[in-house]
Amino acid sequence: MSSRAPWVAHFGFTQTPFRKTIPASQLCERASHQEAVARIRFCIAESLLGVLVGEVGVGKTVALRAATSQLDPAAHHVIYVSNPAFGTRGLYVTIVHALGATPSTRKAELMAQTQALLAAEEQERRRRVVLLVDEAHLLSPEQLEELRLLTNAEMDSASPFALLLVGQPTLARQLRMGVFAALDQRIATRYQLAPMDLAEAATYLRHHLGLVGRTDPLFADDAIARLHKASLGLPRALNNAAVAALIAAASAGKALVDDDCAKKAVAELTRD
Ligand SMILES: Nc1ncnc2c1ncn2[C@@H]1O[C@H](COP(=O)(O)OP(=O)(O)OP(=O)(O)O)[C@@H](O)[C@H]1O
Ligand SMILES: [Mg+2]
């Protein structure tokens, strides 16, 4: 066990607040997050194609994690691609590997192999493949075409897998314009995860502080407003701003984060 940092001890937190490794069961259930999670779950349950977009740090990967954390592993095979920027062969190779086979070295065969494995997983092992492609705005047109071919494999029958494309807002445009336009109608759900409004940011701060043992208000209202504005309502930016403000308050010996501390934090984070 590492000892607590002075500012963590100053506020009597049980551990460092605003950590990245927050378990899915302890997430802040704000409305947009819950809507995103519900849509992802729907796509998985029905083997559909879904698209989730949002700004950097808005909580897309967290929503994916929340939606998949409770899936029954006996009935689902989740394949998570954290970054698809690995060349054209990469997607099929990743899927084949994940399904426990050795990828064919011949490109022409690789696609058929991938399709066969996906179908076998569903039909023989009764496990639904859930393909999650994070950072999907980085998909090249060739990779989008590969995905299109895979999803198209059995147009008339039920889709052999659920596919979630998650990425920055440019993804929505890429899908509408490129080869994927042919599949546009098959996107069962598309959702843009929204940043937090001021009230949500206040709840979010309270939630995170509650997780480390402080349920009383530590941030003054004007400090919250300043941090919310500076973070644009994006959780990752708000985490950083909140920690900087807590450190500023602790080093000034203050029991509360007032607007002065928030100002210092914002100045610190926006400095070049
Ligand atoms: N619902 C939530 N509850 C608690 N913390 C959250 C929540 N949503 C986001 N966060 C916090 O915000 C951070 C950023 O979220 P996440 O990594 O999901 O963003 P992202 O949209 O995937 O960003 P990027 O575009 O960089 O991949 C998380 O590490 C977590 O600390
Ligand atoms: Mg992410």
Image (spheres, grey):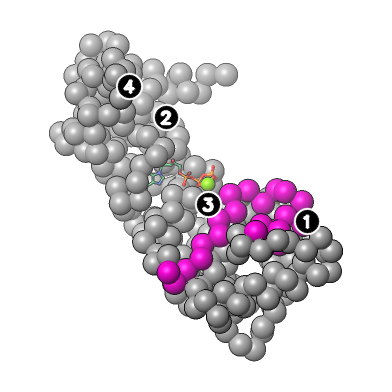
Disc 1: which residue: 88
Mark 4 vs mark 1: in front:
4
Disc 2: which residue: 240
Viewer-closest of 217 and 226: 217
Question: Could you tell me the amino acid type at mark 1?
Answer: Thr
- Label 3 near label 4: C-beta < 8 Å? no
Q: Residues within 10 Å of mark 4 (few under 14, many from 20)?
A: few
The verdict on residue 257 being magenta is no
Residue shown at 35% from the left, 34% from the top: 18
Quadrant field for ligand 1: top left
Disc 3: which residue: 54
In the rendered structure, which disc, 4 or 3, sits on the residue that comes first in sequence? 4
Q: Which secondary structure, mark 1?
A: loop
In the rendered structure, which disc, 1 or 2, sits on the residue that comes first in sequence? 1
Q: Residue 104 bears which disc, if any? A: none
Q: Position of residue 211 (x, y in %)?
A: 24, 39
Mark 1 vs mark 2: in front:
1
Q: Which secondary structure, mark 3?
A: loop
Viewer-closest of 231 and 239: 239
The verdict on residue 86 being magenta is yes
* Distance of label 4 from label 1 (alpha carbons): 43 Å
In the rendered structure, which disc, 3 or 2, sits on the residue that comes first in sequence? 3
* Distance of label 1 from label 2 (alpha carbons): 36 Å
Q: Which residues are magenta?
A: 74-97
Q: Residue 2 bears which disc, if any? A: 4
Q: Residue furthest top?
A: 252
* Distance of label 3 from label 2 (alpha carbons): 19 Å
* Distance of label 1 from label 3 (alpha carbons): 25 Å
Question: Could you tell me the amino acid type at mark 2?
Answer: Asn
Q: Which secondary structure, mark 2?
A: helix
In the rendered structure, which disc, 1 or 3, sits on the residue that comes first in sequence? 3
